[in-house]
Image (cartoon, rainbow, N blue to C red):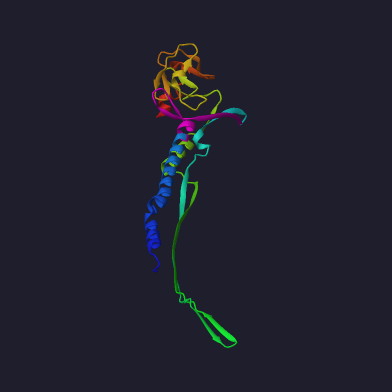
Amino acid sequence: MAISNVPANVATSAMQAIPFSSMIGGPLKACIEAQAMAAKTSWEFIKEVGLNTDEKGQKSAVMVAFSFNKGGRMTQLNVPLLTIVPIPYIAINSVDINFKANINASSSSVSENSSHTEYGGEVDAKAKLNLGLFSLEANLKANYSTKKDSKATEESKYSVESTIDVAVKAGQESMPAGMAKVLEMLNGAVDAVDVKGELMVNSNELTTGDTLVVFYKSPDGLYDPAKVTETSGKLKFDVDGNSVKCVLKDAAAGEYTIKAGDAEVKVNVTDASKAPEDKPSEKEKSE
């Protein structure tokens, strides 16, 4: 009996039916989705931790402020939060996919034929012969039989085994160029300001007719010209960008106190008509 080729055909079909595309492409797709999820996580971290959003949807950097002693005076340091916390940039560096398929097929056939034949005869006859004092009696038997045995067995076995090993290596990726540029600009925004704020004037000694220019920087490090006032209310300021200006044309001679927040500065205004001739005006100084 010939060995059956059915197991071999079944094994070949099983090999062709293995979904190699999904078994190999599946882990790669999962890695791509994981990379996209990591990028989204980084953006969510930046939005939730490093940015504030106002009611108009405008975003601003979260600033961290703390005070320290600098040169004998308390100074407030304002630092963007994104510059002092690590931003998660996890990236997949490599993906190793090891696939192994093992198909075993076997077939066995056993055929056994046996034949056994017996011949015999039996004749039942009796004969008696008398020979004087002796007598002879004979019985004869004859028989015939035929026996035939046959045996046939067939055995087929096959097995399919497939394994896949996936090794993914990920680590902290270098910062994107755009974010590195943003952090570089935020580093430039680190500023140390007096805890009372900083109030600056173009000069503490002015004459009538000169222009008083005042800058005020809040403890948060932001210019806030709207908070600049003069305590007596005699000087009126006009906002000009980050500063305020006041032309002292009609101002009386005397000392004025300029205030903003908790900071204040004294400005002395003298009458130009009584000023010494050799004293240059503020306009001449600027020229």
Residue 161: give x, y in percent of width and height. Answer: 46, 56
The quarter of the picture where residue 224 lies is top left
Q: Quadrant of residue 72?
A: top right
Q: Is 22 drawn above or below residue 1 in the view shown?
A: above
Seen from this angle, which residue lies furthest front? 132
| Residue at 44% over, 36% down | 43
Answer with left or right where residue 33 lies relative to residue 139: left
Is 111 in front, or is 162?
111
Q: Tell me, yes or no, whether the highlighted magenta stretch contains residue 49.
A: yes
Q: Residue at x 49, y 40 (%)?
A: 88
Tell me if residue 6 is in the magenta stretch.
Answer: no
- Between 236 and 62, the one nearer to me in the picture: 62
- Return the residue nearer the eye: 102 or 196: 102
Residue 39 location (% of width, % of height): 43, 40
Residue 157 coordinates in the image, percent (x, y): 45, 60
Q: Which residues are magenta?
A: 45-70
Q: Quadrant of the N terminus?
A: bottom left
Q: Is residue 228 shown above or below 112?
A: above
